[in-house]
Amino acid sequence: MEQKRAVHKTIIRIRQGEREEKQDLITVEAPVTIYLNGRELVTLLCTPEKIDRLALGFLRSEGIITAIDDVASIRVRDEEGLVEIDLKCETDLIEKLYGKRTITSGCGKGTVFFNVLDSLRSSPLEGDLKISAGKIWFLMESLEERAELFKSTGCVHSAALADQEQILCFFEDIGRHNAIDKIIGECLLAGIPTDDKIIVSSGRLSSEILLKAAKLKIQLLVSRAAPTSLCIELAESLNVTLAGFVRGKRTNIYTHGWRITAD
């Protein structure tokens, strides 16, 4: 059974000079530790739901696995916050990464393993995916409609995988990186191809988010927030389209604008 993703706490609220105690719904932040081939690899701080997806997505993002076929078994111990994954083989990379590490929930540095310089040598993505601005606005509206935990607590990010018509899978988490990794894990488990898909996010687009998407051959990232300068530089070189500040009928296109057409 998965841990609760929100709990009730008593708080004091002051409004217009009036002070009162009330019950408020608070987002749960909890550690989840990944064990790889019987050894502790990393601890992630996250919203403790779908932690099997989180663990698989993290391993895929870090280049430890490339497909679900690399995994021999996966065991989830929700109450203890543990995910135990055994791989069919062990590489030199895994050996270098072993050791106790804690990764923040994602506002600063989201990972400790990823080497950004490696990505700078990556080949630009191929693909001619196109979408109208109207469809982008619709996908963002759909994301916001599904964000029930955010509506209740105001304390999480949302992310979704979409095609050109609708959202295919959706996750909320205290960390932007975690929400994307849960999408990646879902794609691995469900066998969802990603090279013709779109990522829609509520959080800012950082270089790490861009690189997670590029590894999946995602050509288009859509966000309610803005991208960073390094994210834009990487998107330019990797042939990825960035659309930020998607709010109402407004969109800023930062890179490769030919993929987004006016209505």
Image: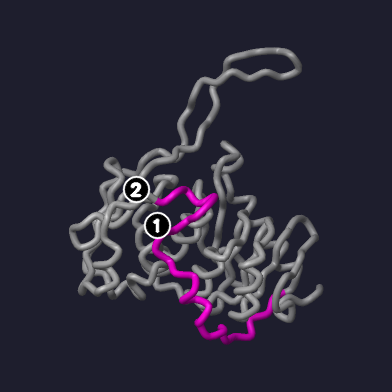
Residue 126: in magenta span: yes
Q: Quadrant of residue 225?
A: bottom right
Residue drawn at the location 48% of the way across and 56% of the way down: 110
State the count of labels.
Answer: 2
Quadrant where the N terminus lies? top left
Q: Quadrant of the C terminus?
A: bottom right
Q: Is 153 situated above or below 233?
A: above
Relative to the observer, which residue lies in front, 23 or 86?
86
The picture places residue 249, in percent across and down from the top left corner, at 80, 60
Determine whether the residue tagged by mark 1 lies in a helix, strand or loop.
helix
- The residues colored magenta run 103-131
- Within 10 angstroms of label 2, few (less than 14), some, or many (20 or more) residues? many
Q: Residue furthest left?
A: 38
**Mark 2 falls on what kind of element?**
strand
Q: Say the numbered circle drawn on residue 29.
A: none
Q: Is residue 169 magenta?
A: no
| Residue carrying label 2 | 32
Task: Specify which label sits upstream in the sequence, 1 or 2.
Answer: 2
Mark 2 residue type: Val
**Residue occupying the point 53% across, 31% down:** 25
Residue 223, quarter of the rendered image? bottom right
Q: Position of residue 41 (x, y in %)?
A: 28, 57
> Which amino acid type is marked by label 1?
Leu
* Residue at which label 1 appears: 54
Residue 170 can be seen in this image: yes
Q: Would you say the residues marked 1 and 2 are in contact, meaning their CB atoms lie under 8 Å apart?
A: yes
Which numbered disc, 1 or 2, marks the residue closer to the eye?
2
Task: Determine crowd level at label 1: few under 14, some 14-19, many 20+ residues with C-alpha closer than 10 A.
Answer: many
